[in-house]
Amino acid sequence: MVTAKLYLKPKKEESLKRFHPWVFSGAIQKISGTPAEGDLIEIFDCNGNYCAIGHYQIGSIAVRILSFEEKEINTSFWKEKISNAYQLRLSLGLLREDNNSFRLIHGEGDGLPGLIVDIYGETAVMQAHSVGMHTIRMEIAEAIINVFHGKIKNVFYKSESTLPYKANIAVEDGYLIGECSGDCIAKENGLLFHVDWLKGQKTGFFIDQRENRTLLEKYSKNRNVLNMFCYTGGFSFYAMRGEALRVDSVDSSSKAIELTNRNVELNFPNDTRHKAYATDAFKFLDDIKKDEYDLIILDPPAFAKHRDVLRNALQGYKKLNAKAFEKIKKGGIVFTFSCSQAVNKEQFRLAVFSAAAMSGRNVRILHQLEQPADHPINIYHPEGEYLKGLVLYVE
Ligand code: SAH
């Protein structure tokens, strides 16, 4: 329901004309009406010309835009958006006999700011990052069921940790539709994994590394692999399929290590090549001998969640990469990543460059990696680009 009209200060409509999907609170001239958080609000320039419609929220991002055309945001709007997203994933070839996990909705990248939906087999896991998406959650869940023609049976809502804590709403994670009983096992490129969307990080799995794991598999043959920050072991089971000699997985969370072990067992029962360690990654790298590994994966959590901690984050990447360069065997490969949205490609590369220089090793870039196509970047919203990685050859 549209409950209010928002008028922008002069010239503040410029970014909307370039389809940027946010209105910052500083751009507001006045609001007529008293919108509640999560309500639909129409936006006008200072001369009263219509600009867009979106979800209103109290905070620095005051409106997340749903449409730049004057249109009603109703059931058919949600269905069309979700159907478009589904068609794109179909055309990317992500729904296959051997692959049933992918991201269906990537916020601004799919024209739906504030909404994330990941698919794991018959279950959709939905995450709201705005009060507007929280308010409309049931309608979205129904649209998902509708669009998938019976292929999705359950919709799990997981937003306790993603909604702004200041918003005056009681959020509880749980099923909106259906319920997955027993173990929930999903498939990625023929490999199986347990997904714990109830307690796990994000929606339960890091789908965004799918293509990068595929590349890693090709480099794994006859190598001793160290998967740092393994979470549920994604890179580890690809390395094993790629005929690695030995794979060690490290994560500070013992829950993650438990899941890694279960996932490796699910794909490679009784395979003695794999070991997992619940410990701090920096300490682990300090303690290992030089030359023990010739393939190291570094996929840490976002070191910079905000711009104001950028400097520390870059130091963190530098320190971590330097430790890996110090220890890796000659002719080894490092897969190194940053998922901090506040750190751009150049800054990350510079941090890795400094690490290489510190270690004195000869380092060459073999590949430059990014987020996969089911995490599309809206060209008008470059902030949506977050995952970057480098594959390095270290001599
Ligand atoms: N590579 C993983 C995703 C990594 S997410 C995948 O492909 O699924 C980042 C992980 O780093 C989390 O599981 C978190 O528990 C772990 N972590 C955070 N700080 C850590 C530290 N200091 N040492 C080891 N692991 C850490």
Image: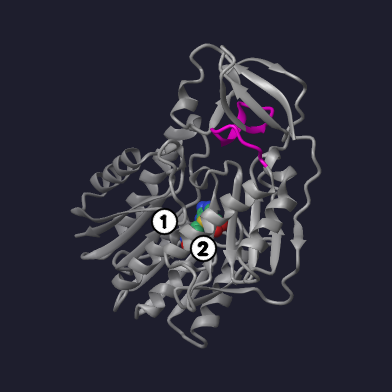
Residue 316, picture quadrant: top left
Say if residue 112 shows up in the picture: yes
Of 274 and 1, nearer the camera is: 1
Query: At 59% across and 71% down in the image, what residue appears?
Result: 121
In x, y percent, where is residue 200?
64, 60
Query: At 29% across and 67% down in the image, what residue appears?
Result: 291
Quadrant where the C terminus is found in the figure: bottom left
Which colour assignment does the render follow? one colour
Query: At 66% across and 62% down in the image, what residue appears?
Result: 146
Mark 2 / mark 1, whichever is N-terminal:
2
In x, y percent, where is residue 86?
53, 59
Q: Callout 1: few (<14), some (14-19), or many (20+) C-alpha neighbours within 10 Å?
A: some
Label 1 sits on a secondary structure element that is loop
Of 29 and 357, nearer the camera is: 29
Residue extent of the magenta highlight: 54-73
Determine the CA span between mark 2 and mark 1.
10 Å
190 lies above or below 389: below
Which residue is disc 1 drawn over? 373
What kind of residue is marked 2? Phe
Question: Taking 167 as reference, is 237 left or right?
Answer: left
Which residue is disc 2 drawn over? 102
Question: Taking 32 as reference, is 327 left or right?
Answer: left
Question: Taking 349 as reference, is 385 left or right?
Answer: right
